[in-house]
Image: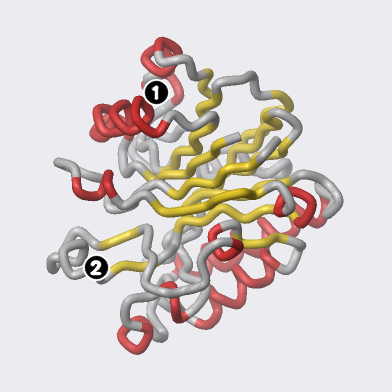
């Protein structure tokens, strides 16, 4: 199974790029975040023509997650089990070829100390409970998506510049570490130890040209699934294309 995750920053704006990437990369599963559209506006028919089934949890203007898969998804879950009406469309889970895939778009947080920052921390705590209450470490479980957190200094182009700021503050890093401690292993770090590998670059200040990025998009796997992870890498090429997302795909390959 070749699985990828990509925050596309509007599927409407980025459909040509996603199409181009699917035609060349040909993943079995693609998890998308930040769709910025309702379910009925998602281009499911377009992806069906390309051989992908779509599961979508959309929201007007903001958020939204989707899973494209060459094989059928089962036991699809949209949002937390106890989610209130009108909750953000930030979590979509499905079982694909025996693997429980949980696609998440963790809140950005705006800035440290803001209401949105507190919401982000609460959402991450809720995500940890989601795994505690619904999953077993002995299962094949994968969580991927835009975590909006760089876990370590080697995941940030300039740790001193980002220290104490949103995406790299101590409380966010502690919260994401708490999720990892459920029993997850960073698939990318199974194969690459060195720093300087990023998945997101701000549109401003020539960040991509200067490679002033952060690794905030992740694929994490349970220990039993980690044994099947043969490769994981970041594909920077789509960030060089015209009108790109500020994120780029992260890929994992599993011998399942």
Residue 86 lies in what quarter of the image?
top right
248 is higher (above) or lower (below) than 256:
below
Q: Position of residue 219 (x, y in %)?
A: 56, 53
Few, some or many residues within 10 Å of mark 1 (<14, 14–19, 20+):
many
Query: Is 16 situated left or right of 23 in this image?
Result: left
| Of marks 2 and 1, the one in the foreground | 2
Residue 18 lies in what quarter of the image?
top left
Residue 24 lies in what quarter of the image?
top left
Name the residue located 54 percent from the left edge and 59 percent from the top edge.
188
The quarter in which the C terminus is drawn is top right
128 is higher (above) or lower (below) than 40:
below
Give the color scheme: rainbow, by chain, secondary structure or one colour.
secondary structure
Q: Which residue is mark 2?
A: 211
178 is higher (above) or lower (below) than 105:
below
Few, some or many residues within 10 Å of mark 2 (<14, 14–19, 20+):
some
**Closer to the camera, 89 or 198?**
198
Query: Is 58 situated left or right of 240 in this image?
Result: right
Q: Which mark is residue 73?
A: none
Q: Position of residue 38 (x, y in %)?
A: 41, 27
Q: Position of residue 122 (x, y in %)?
A: 60, 64
Say which label, 2 or 1, has the lower sequence index: 1
Q: Is residue 98 visible?
A: yes
Name the residue located 57 percent from the left edge and 43 percent from the top edge.
253
Q: Which mark is residue 42?
A: 1
188 is higher (above) or lower (below) than 212:
above
Q: Is residue 57 visible?
A: no
The quarter in which the N terminus is drawn is top right
């Amino acid at each position: 199974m070749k699985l990828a995750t990509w925050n596309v920053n509007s599927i409407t704006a980025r459909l040509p790029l996603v199409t181009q990437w699917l035609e060349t990369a040909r993943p079995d599963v693609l998890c998308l975040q930040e769709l910025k559209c309702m379910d009925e506006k998602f281009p499911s028919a377009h992806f069906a023509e390309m051989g992908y089934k779509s599961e979508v949890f959309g929201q007007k203007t903001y958020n939204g997650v989707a899973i494209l898969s060459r094989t059928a998804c089962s036991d699809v879950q949209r949002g937390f089990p106890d989610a209130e009406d009108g909750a953000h469309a930030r979590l979509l889970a499905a079982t694909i070829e025996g693997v429980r895939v949980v696609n998440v778009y963790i809140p950005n947080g705006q800035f440290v100390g803001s209401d949105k920052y507190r919401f982000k921390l609460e959402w991450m705590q809720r995500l940890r409970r989601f795994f505690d209450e619904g999953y077993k470490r002995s299962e094949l479980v994968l969580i991927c998506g835009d975590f909006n957190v760089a876990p370590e200094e080697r995941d940030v182009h300039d740790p001193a510049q980002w220290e104490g700021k949103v995406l790299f503050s101590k409380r966010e890093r502690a919260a994401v570490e708490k999720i990892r401690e459920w029993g997850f292993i960073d698939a990318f770090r199974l194969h690459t130890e060195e720093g300087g590998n990023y998945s997101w670059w701000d549109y401003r200040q020539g960040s991509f040209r200067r490679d002033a990025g952060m690794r905030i998009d992740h694929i994490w796997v349970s220990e039993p699934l980690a044994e099947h992870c043969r490769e994981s890498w970041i594909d920077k090429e789509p960030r060089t294309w015209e009108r790109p997302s500020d994120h780029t795909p992260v890929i994992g390959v599993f011998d399942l």
